[in-house]
Image (cartoon, helix red, strand yellow):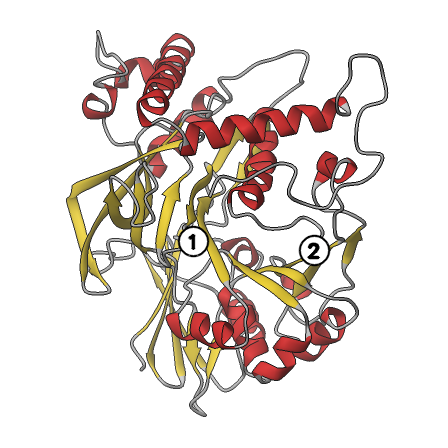
Amino acid sequence: MPFSFKDRPQNISGYGEQPFAFLEPDAHQIVGHIASIDLIENGDGAARVRWQKKQLGNLINHAYVRSDFWRQRIPAGVTPQDALQRLPILSRKDIAMQAQKEGSLFHDKKQGSPATYETTGSTGTPLKVFVCEQNGYYNEVRSLAQYFIDNLPLDENRVEIRPVVRSVDLRRKTDLPTVDPHWAGPLSKIYCNGSNRTLRFNNDVDGLLSELAKDRVGYLVCPSRVIEQLLDRGPDLVEKLGIKVWLHLSDYRSREVIGKLKRIGVPSLSNFSSGETGPIAFECRMNEGYYHVAHSNVIVECDRTLTTEFDGEVVSRLLITHLHSYATPLIRYDIGDFGKLHEGCPCGHNGPTISHIYGRGKHFLRHPDGRFIPFYLSTRLLREAVDFEECRFRQDALDTITVQIGGRETLDRDEEERLKATIIAATDPAFSVVIKPVREIDWSDNPKRLFFSSSVV
């Protein structure tokens, strides 16, 4: 059913008090943009396609005028109608070269210099892109829009659990939370809105539970590896935390975890996104594993010249065109994920929908005592121990983690010891860590270039 702006608890002082003002200006702007996003993504398909072609034409013209790199890639006479068939696929290497050589292609003296975003580098080398202020604003508004699209109330609390990214934090307990009185930004002026807590978590489950128990959780935003550790303490304990919905992000989410939460009345929703592009698709509330593309932000293609198998299905490489990437254009970007692209969703949604998304690493180690433990190491953290071009982790034996360090023929003893200490701090001393420096990592058996894989069942 279409959502309504009025069917949720409101603040009595939520409307504008100045002449000719219906809402406070910043709240009015966000409400208008949420309505626009809903129209584009869930309204008339032909109108949406026309809008996307116009936006794509704007982006291509912008890139052509401001970039030698893009002038060499854009064929003469290309139109928005045939651009996505005639432009070459954009790789991470291409993006890095353009950004380093030409910098940002978006300049607005009123807004100052564009910001940079650096990916976590799941294949070894972080990618830096330039982003506009408008990109951050869009991401914020699109996130809020999903609460309306999914008919989720705004008066619930929200807790986001993030992993550590610095080596200095590896040995710390769960940090004290950052607490904000509201999480819906200017919309909290109109609607009753819950509090927002942000926690950094480093496998200190007791500390995490202590913090979570201080107030009703509401919306829990975290990777699967966190919720699984909570479930290990028992479903009754998780139920007492007052989790309204689990909003999954980042990693692989198993059906087993979804089932355990359903049995205690906790639904889960996931999304597909990247730091470079922002939101790509949001999971259908009615059909688990189907993701409605965020048409107001991206165009998604399937490149069927490169496929792999996942969950019994043949999946194709996904190419993402970020329609608002004016600082660092991302047109037909090989994001490194695979999936199946459908014209619509079983729920009746009229628009491209992705299923069987493959690429979110199953970051779990089988401990020598038989249990699974989550594995997370960002390359930013690893680079504090040793310099490298790319890296790959494998668990080929129950008690051994093998690490390939690309771009290094040798490591000195201090480097190796620092790296081992970092890995053991993030995993468990029960593992033996084998470091293998190599000039270049052979990814031929892993087209996704997954940062971590395990062959131990």
Q: Quadrant of the rendered structure where residue 75 is? A: top left
Residue 417 at least partly seen: no
Find numbered disc 1 in the image and state the secondary structure of the residue it sits on: loop
Residue 258, numbered label: none
**Spatial distance from mark 2 to mark 1, Cα to Cα?**
33 Å
Sooner in the amino-acid sequence: mark 2 or mark 1:
1
Residue type pointed to by label 1: Ser
Left or right: where does residue 216 sit relative to residue 312?
Answer: right
Q: Which residue is rendered at x = 36% and y = 11% of the image?
A: 64
Q: Are marks 2 and 1 in contact (CB under 8 Å)?
A: no
Nearer-the-camera pick, 140 or 422: 140
Find numbered disc 2 in the image and state the secondary structure of the residue it sits on: loop
Left or right: where does residue 93 sit relative to residue 26?
Answer: left
Mark 2, Cα crowd under 10 Å, few <14 / some 14-19 / many 20+, is many
Mark 2 — residue?
Answer: 156
Mark 1 — residue?
Answer: 122
Q: Which residue is rendered at x = 21% and y = 18% of the image?
A: 82
Q: Which residue is rendered at x = 24% and y = 19% of the image?
A: 83
Residue type pointed to by label 2: Glu
Q: Is residue 217 above or below residue 332?
A: below
Where's residue 124, x and y in %?
41, 52
Where's residue 18, x and y in %?
85, 17
Q: Quadrant of the C terminus?
A: bottom left
Where's residue 197, x and y in %?
73, 57
Nearer-the-camera pick, 272 or 413: 272
Mark 1, Cα crowd under 10 Å, few <14 / some 14-19 / many 20+, is many
